[in-house]
Amino acid sequence: MILRRLCLMLVVWLLAAPAQADELRPGYLELTQKDAAQWTMIWKAPVLGGLATRARPALPSFCTAGPAQSRIDGGTVVAAMTVTCTRPLDGEQVGIAGMEASFTDALMRIAPLGRPVQAERLTRARPMATVRAVPGRWQVAETYLVLGVEHILAGYDHLLFVIAMVLLLGGLWNTVKAATAFTVAHSITLVGSTLGLVGLAQAPVEALIALSIVFLAVEIAKQGDGALRLSQRIPWLVAFGFGLIHGFGFAGALREIGLPESDVPMALLTFNLGVELGQVAVVIGVLALLTALRRFAPAMLRPATLAATYAIGITASYWFIERMVA
């Protein structure tokens, strides 16, 4: 009975997942010091979540912001301005006012002149942070590690791909091989795209990501009709090919989040590591559920898998059509 409820909850969750995939769109506040008094401030506020309409950068009273140069980039308002401060920011509170009325977190990067960069993750419960004279060396690593985990868990298209891959393969060893190939592939394109070595337009990438989920859903639905499916014969190769595409998607998310120029290697490494930790958590969770079904309710395994598969396939098909006509 408990297993049936768990399966029903999984299906309902998949059906209720927001139609707009890849929801991780945090705000981004960057302060880069130019000389003793002047800073350049960049403020990226996504409309979705309320930051663009309900929040604004919060600086000490002795800092004055000049005229802003603003533009709309996708669903994000981007503003750049010069800030003049009559005193150093060391020990002062800097952050975002109005976050408690929004639904989105934000990343803040403070780059003092000639000193280590300070990176902070701001939330509704913690919208302000203290500027430290000597930031901890692992701040950037911690911030981007958390962002990577959140991206795989809150980026619904990547999340559904991983779930579908586990549902398709089922067994531990095949899943491990496919997950490893997917990891290697998306790491290659994530690094290459972020460093400007390779690139694809984001619109077709997002459409292909949705199509990759539809492909896996079809493969699951047609399991057991005779010959082994392509994804069952060479799962690692299929996962590698789709991983290359998903890597461009991860890179696009990193561009929207903002990558600290002086800390690219650390931020890139820890973001990718965070993605992998989130992916491992999903794989373990789905495998545990499938194992429980095989042991305690084997008759429900195929119906529950098909129910989840159709929910995934319908959602991904909607995303594909939406992204093709957008």
Image (cartoon, rainbow, N blue to C red):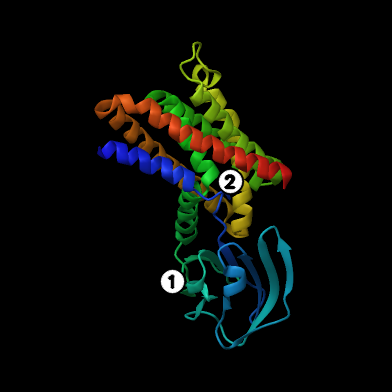
Residue displayed at 55% across by 53% down: 23
Residue 191 shows in the view: no
Q: What is the crowding at mark 1: few (fewer than 14 residues within 10 Å), some, or many (at least 20)? A: few
- Identified by mark 2, the residue type is Phe
List x then y, in percent, for residue 319. 61, 43
Q: Nearer the viewer, residue 305 or 32?
A: 305
Q: Residue at the location (43% across, 23% down)?
A: 174
Residue positioned 54% across, 35% down in the render? 313
Q: Under tag 1, what secondary structure?
A: loop
| Residue 239, horizontal then vertical, whole percent | 54, 29
Answer whether residue 12 is visible to the viewer in this image: yes
190 on left or right of 203: left
Q: Which mark is residue 250?
A: 2
- Amino acid type of disc 1? Arg
Secondary structure category for the residue under label 2: helix
Pick the residue in front: 220 or 258: 220
Q: How many marks?
A: 2
Q: CA–CA distance between discs 2 and 1? A: 26 Å
Image side of residue 104 versus residue 319, left or right: left
Task: Locate residue 69: give its quadrant.
Answer: bottom right
| Residue 126 numbered tag | 1
Task: Tell whether label 1 touches label 2 (CB within 8 Å).
Answer: no
Mark carried by residue 289: none
Q: Earlier in the sequence, mark 2 or mark 1?
A: 1
Residue 142 position (above or below residue 21):
below
Looking at the image, which is closer to me, 201 or 94? 201
Quadrant of the rendering where the N terminus is positioned: top left
Q: Vertical placement of 264 versus 130: above or below?
A: above
Residue 140 locus on image (x, y percent): 50, 59
In the displayed structure, 241 sits above or below 274; it is above
Residue at screen point 53% across, 65% down: 106
Query: Splitting the image into 4 quarters, where does residue 88 fall?
Result: bottom right
